[in-house]
Image (cartoon, coloured by chain):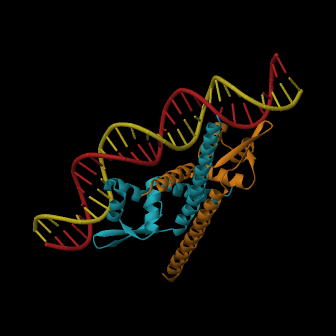
Chain colours: A orange, B cyan, C red, D yellow
DNA sequence: TCATTAGTCAATAAATATATAAACTAAAAA
DNA sequence: TTTTTAGTTTATATATTTATTGACTAATGA
């Protein structure tokens, strides 16, 4: 295996690790809908600010988020918008599967009901 | 936030966690190029088989890989091909950035050389 | 200058992830 | 039936992640 490809797998693994938390995925989603400051995120997420700061540090560390100062606050934005695209692709698939599962469960319940009526 | 969306973030985070290792990303890539058995992967990856088994268990546990028996071996295939699509999207971006970084570093070296010649 | 705002840092405890070695198992072949 | 193949399981040591608390800092505004 050529070393450049191996390097890319490692980079990509670091990005996946940074994405591997529901809060961080939600944060990316919020920011992709429009740049936000930490305190704006705090209002929405309702978690301790030290915790938010840690999660943001993970995302910045992986190069997924970038930051600029604006007055007292720091404005966060996506550094690699394609990552959010990839995330949305995955979410679409998962949402579809959840819906499908839901419909299947409902169909199973219907079958049970009908059997009960007949008995 | 509606609970269905929160559930999807959690599902997605589990998938990202399963992807968050260079070996597992490479395994997915190998399998997406064509179904493979464990021993085929072992030949390519040259890692202890207990370790491969653990990594495959992670991928199967997240629902990313599925498995069928064929004689003595178990054949692995992608259960959600769109995940590999998303991974490739990310890899493309990373490869581009690495190339760009490489070119920039080279330009910087050139500049240094020219300065030395003039001195 | 002093207080406030927005955020980071450091320490800690608990939970998870990883690699490795060695024992184990199930299906197929001899 | 015994052996072999292909893979899993268990135990263990180490490292990493996460949430939480409380102290800290840098920029702004009164």
For the point 45% across and 59% down, the residue is: B26
The image shows residue A67 at horizontal and vertical percentages of: 71, 43
C29 relative to A99 in the view: left or right = left
Front residue (pair D1, B18)? B18
Give the residue furthest to the front: B118
For the point 59% across and 43% down, the residue is: B109
For the point 50% across and 80% down, the residue is: A115
Depicted A93 relative to depicted A1: above or below: below
* Quadrant including the N terminus of chain A: bottom left
For the point 48% across and 68% down, the residue is: B79
Task: Decide if residue A46 is in sight here.
Answer: yes
The image shows residue A23 at horizontal and vertical percentages of: 62, 49
Task: Decide if residue B17 is in sight here.
Answer: no
Front residue (pair A107, B17)? B17
The image shows residue D13 at horizontal and vertical percentages of: 34, 37
Numbered disc total: 0
């Amino acid at each position: 295996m050529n070393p450049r490809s191996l390097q890319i797998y490692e980079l990509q693994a670091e990005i996946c690790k940074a994405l591997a938390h529901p809060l961080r995925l939600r944060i990316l989603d919020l920011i992709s809908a429009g740049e936000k400051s930490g305190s704006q995120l705090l209002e929405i997420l309702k978690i301790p600010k030290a915790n938010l700061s840690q999660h943001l540090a993970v995302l910045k560390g992986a190069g997924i988020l970038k930051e600029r100062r604006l007055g007292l606050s720091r404005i966060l934005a996506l550094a690699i918008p394609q990552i959010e695209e990839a995330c949305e692709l995955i979410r679409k698939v998962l949402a579809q599967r959840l819906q499908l599962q839901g419909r299947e469960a409902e169909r199973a319940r219907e079958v049970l009901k009908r059997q009960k009526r007949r008995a």
